[in-house]
Amino acid sequence: MHVLVVEDEQHLAEGLRFNLEAEGFDVTVRENGEDALADFEGKKSRYDLLVLDVMLPGIDGFEVIRRLREARQFLPTLMLTARSRPDDVVKGIAAGADDYLAKPFDLGVLIARIKGLIRRREWIGAASAEPAEQIRINGRLIDFKTLEIEVDGERQPLTLMEVNLLKYLIEHEGEAVSRADLLDKVWQVQSDTDTRAIDNFIVRLRKYIETDPAHPECLLTVRGVGYRLNRG
Ligand code: CA
């Protein structure tokens, strides 16, 4: 397992390296977003997981994860946010992060979160082997094992968060699911957080599963509540 740490505070970066290496991970540290992105250019990434600080010199962590997801790099990503800026959590998740941790944090908690992300990725594959590894929504094939969706014969990767959200909606098919529920059950963040992050994800999922994303027939908005999924 190779972890990329993007953190400009040298003291913290070295602390992360030391502790992650002690846990058996290979670790590479980059001090800014541009250098981190350069590692992903034109080749398959050698990293299995990303620890990404929000506040960086040059482009910030939101922009880094946004560009990585745009470049179809879907490695699990833990974002380091400032405790004084709770909106950063939602912003980070909306940009494509899978989990977050507020600074200052306990290194033991960070290690646990990283292991959690790795486990979740493995769990999605293993658990979905049970009822159905693959599910169809509106003729699109969703492969929970490879975290991919097949649209018109072309496979596209999904992020962990997108898969978790789809899974939750599928489990509650036909029911109106509230945004607060999604924040709590899928993202595990407090429901007093801004719910717009969810709407961004829904827009993205509609692009994958709807014939006409502007007029959804599967992933429906339930006014004043949230969303409802019909597989079609
Ligand atoms: Ca920083």
Image (cartoon, grey):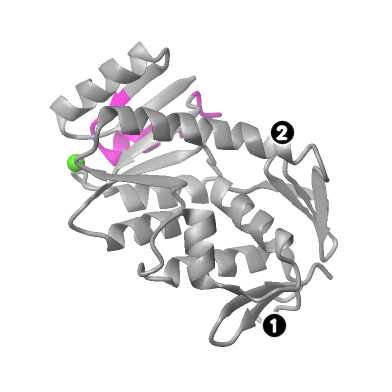
- Reply above or below: 117 against 142: above
Please state which of residues 215 and 137 is positioned toward the viewer in this rendering: 137
Q: In the image, residue 161 lies at what x, y percent? A: 55, 51
User: Callout 1, which amino acid?
Assistant: His
Residue 37 counted in the magenta span? yes
Q: Total number of numbered labels?
A: 2
Q: Which residues are magenta?
A: 29-46
- Reply above or below: 188 against 116: below
The answer to whether mark 1 and mark 2 are in CB contact below 8 A is no
Q: In the image, residue 76 lies at what x, y percent? A: 49, 38
Quarter holding residue 38: top left
Q: Residue at x 67, y 43 (%)?
A: 147
Q: Residue at x 37, y 70 (%)?
A: 194
Please state which of residues 75 and 102 is positioned toward the viewer in this rendering: 102
Quarter holding residue 11: top left
Residue that numbered label 1 is attached to: 215
The local secondary structure at tag 2 comes to: helix
Q: In the image, residue 97 lies at what x, y percent? A: 44, 48
Query: Which dot marks residue 126?
Result: 2
Q: CA distance from mark 1 to mark 2?
A: 34 Å
In the rendered image, which quarter contains the C terminus? bottom right
Q: Is residue 140 left or right of residue 175?
A: right
Q: In the image, residue 48 lies at what x, y percent? A: 50, 27
